[in-house]
Image: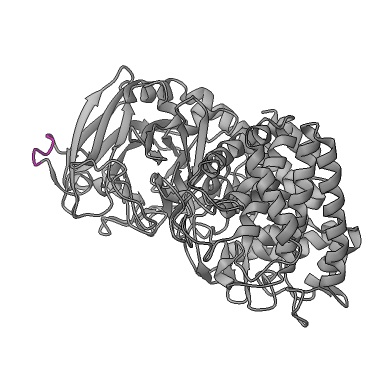
Amino acid sequence: MKLAARLALCGLLGMTGGALAQDRAPATPLIAHDPYFSVWSMSDKLAGSETKHWTGSEQPITGLARIDGKTYRFLGRNPESISEMKQVAHSISATHTRYAFEQSGVRLELAFFTPALPGDLDLLSRPVTYMTVTASATDSVPHKISVLFDVDPVIAVNDRSQKVTSFRQQTEELGVLSTGSQEQKMLGRSGDDLRIEWGYFHLAVPRNERAAMVIAPHAREYFAEHGALPKSDSLRMPEPAGRDAAHLAVALELGEVGAAAVERHVLVAYTEDYAIQYLQRNMRPYWQRNDMPVEEMLDRAEKERAALEAKGQAFDKELQTDLEKAGGKPYAAIAILSYRQTLAAHKLVDDANGDPMLFAKENFSNGCIATVDVLYPSAPFFLFFQPKLLEAQLRPVLQYAALSRWKFPFSPHDLGQYPLANGQVYGGGEKTEEDQMPVEESGNMLILVDAVARAEGNAHLAQQYWPQLTKWAEYLKEKGLDPENQLTTDDFAGHVAHNANLSIKAIDALAAYADLAKLLNQNAVATEYDATAHAMAAKWQQLAIEGDHYKLAFNSPGTWSQKYNLVWDKVLGYNLFPDSVRESEVKFYRTKLNKYGLPLDSRADYTKLDWSVWTATLASSPEDFHAIVDPIYTWTLETPTRVPLTDWYDTKNGKQIGFQARSVVGGVYIKALSDKDLTTKWRAK
């Protein structure tokens, strides 16, 4: 089916609030806050599978609706003996995911709302998602309706063998059911395919709602049969989080519902006291930096719900409109699907001096924390919405690099393995240069520090860490033009010597260093490095040219690659390379397109989602941009791999090669970032 026909079929119309109707997302974000609190639907129908953590481990949340004495299932796969409601709509916007169901004369709408608004760091770090159900009659006949939400306690531990303790409490605004690990191994281990095993999950309902709550096994089955909850809580705590463990359950009474809609809501949250360990010191979530009690945070979330809902809907609608203007509807669809995933691969914490620090987890790779070549591709998202959040990612790396223990003349690759940021673990770590990424990471850091300085209107971060930046610039001046046999961020492709795209990064980085020197009134240094960057750019064209395009590596005839690093020359206005370089590359790329996109280079059919959009942004015409981006949108609709967006997939069969749920998909915002007026508007929010 041609894209135009598919767009017409999908409608690309919102249910409400500017939501984008997504005919079929690879996976749908339901609750997406950070690498541990991240729950998704990985099927077309919300009742078609159990909800899962981004890693694929089940974290079941069940939703049942009882209509005129008969029970239907609308969220989760179990109990399978209960009939599914008919799902009739599904949409995803920046801060909302919505579903609609129809059954027995009733329309039931379910919304997941996470107020992930980058302009408010306290709000952004608040670990609360609202789940709202709205019911109305479609046949002019009143119907008696109640709704159950049921949460499996495995959501609070790594696996079902671990014991949990569940309890209830009341706050000023809410009745709260909570569950957490008995052992509470706070920051006890690091890794990739892990769930949290300390802190507590909370299911909360407003005290003024008509609701019942219970902590009991088989609450779903009891509700399905009796239309009510068991009368008493389980007393078996602690107990393993097995299949028969006590669940947290809330039954909401909607009463006799006619044509006028009736709405009820619950809050889900996860709190953990300490979230990250950085250089051996434990760091609190940002919202808790002033020791705010969990109860106060939950109450505040409830009191602010209506105002936040209105703000979130306006945010969603305006962002949708502006993204469509920037890159068209397929581009907007990709960017919206990337929004919460980008944020949820990070944790925002409080430094000892009150500065925010934002740590990225390298999901489904090796679990590294603060990986510099993950910060680099995700940076456009933060530069577009909130540059302070990019500074909050760079500062921990710069602090670490300034320590005497980091002995190399180039930038670190990472700070450890999530959630322990106690020193580099990748490659040779702090001991050897083996499998390091010297040109890659040094170039990344220089470009990003300059991008932050431009965005914030000052170079205070560069001034504070000028010795480190100078050391890295000197390294690139010597090693950057014709890189030795070393890894790039695309390390899965192996070592490449004389890498043309990596050389571009080094050249851009030297221009970035020159720009920073100018901002710091070091004019002689600025002049020297600007001249060096321009001279290297001229030499690069001679080394890389091959007929109508530029090679993968200087010594490799008959090759090609996406030169995505050229995008900073355009976005940051370094003006190192003539337009003809970009234009000839884009023209050549159009001859290499497969069904689902442009391969990364001539060695394989796989591609990287983030880099492909960077490459598309090199285009001078909308036609060329769409030629590269539109197949990516088609891929989101047709990929057989049902996981949160992978950024590494096969362009012919659409299958995931590796990686999922990573923050690097924030790189798709490079197109929006390239629009200076649009960027200025969104940074001001």
Which quarter of the picture shows residue 493? bottom right
The answer to whether residue 187 is left or right of residue 4 is left
The answer to whether residue 68 is left or right of residue 475 is left
Question: For this rendering, which residue is in front, 284 or 646?
Answer: 284
Which quarter of the picture shows residue 82? bottom left
- When the figure is inspected, residue 511 is found, relative to residue 503, above or below; the finding is above
- Residue 233 falls inside the magenta stretch: yes
Q: Position of residue 590 (x, y in %)?
A: 79, 71
Dominant secondary structure of the magenta stretch?
Answer: loop
Location of the C terminus by quadrant is top right
Q: Give the magenta part as a residue range.
A: 231-236
Question: For this rendering, which residue is in front, 195 or 263?
Answer: 195
Location of the N terminus by quadrant is bottom right
The answer to whether residue 354 is left or right of residue 78 is right
Question: For this rendering, which residue is in front, 344 or 331?
Answer: 344
The answer to whether residue 540 is left or right of residue 304 is right
Question: For this rendering, which residue is in front, 258 or 483?
Answer: 483
Residue 498 visible here: yes
- Residue 142 falls inside the magenta stretch: no
Which quarter of the picture shows residue 613? bottom right
Q: Position of residue 579 (x, y in %)?
A: 90, 58
Furthest-top residue in this view: 172
